[in-house]
Image: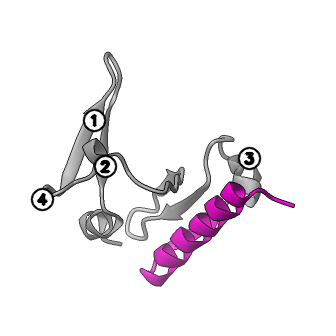
Amino acid sequence: MASKSKIKGNTYERELVKIFLDQGFDAERARGSDGRSLGMEEDVDGYFKITRTGKKIKWQAKRRRSIPLWLQTGNSDIVLVREDRGTNNVVCSLEFFLELIGK
């Protein structure tokens, strides 16, 4: 039997796929949260495809009891974060992200 956290993660991944499908995107979850089942890297949980460009956006899903305050957008649209000498990353709500990319 799977652990509670694994069940929670799988449920979240399925929820994300449903959101993408409902928004009109082609989307799929990797079996066992292992991107190799989709011909991708192991740490990919799924993807959705932008219709107008055909670009597949690979995603890794993390569901936590609470998000650290420093990662919450508050009154901003996005949070930019980078580790020292690392790459820049963007945190935003899924709704805002979907609005930005369109289909």
Q: CA distance from mark 4 to mark 2?
A: 13 Å
Residue 75 is labelled as 4
Classify 87 as above or below 89: above
Circle 3 SS class: helix
Task: Return the disc, 1 or 2, that comes first in the chain's sequence.
Answer: 1
Picture residue at 31% right of the left edge, 18% below the top:
84
1 and 2 marks in contact (CB < 8 Å): yes
Picture residue at 26% right of the left edge, 66% below the top:
96
Residue under pointer 3: 36
Q: Amino acid at mark 3?
A: Arg
Residue under pointer 2: 91
Q: Quadrant of the N terminus?
A: bottom right
Q: Answer with the quarter of the image where residue 28 lies.
A: bottom right
Task: Return the disc, 3 or 1, that comes first in the chain's sequence.
Answer: 3
Q: Amino acid at mark 1?
A: Val
Q: CA distance from mark 1 to mark 2?
A: 8 Å
Circle 2 SS class: strand
Q: In the rendered view, does 60 fall on the left or right side of 69?
A: right
Residue under pointer 1: 81
77 inside magenta stretch: no
- Number of other residues with Cα within 10 Å of mark 2, as a class: few under 14, some 14 to 19, many 20 or more: some
Task: Return the disc, 1 or 4, that comes first in the chain's sequence.
Answer: 4
Picture residue at 66% right of the left edge, 46% below the top:
40
Task: Return the disc, 4 or 2, that comes first in the chain's sequence.
Answer: 4
Magenta stretch, residue numbers: 1-29
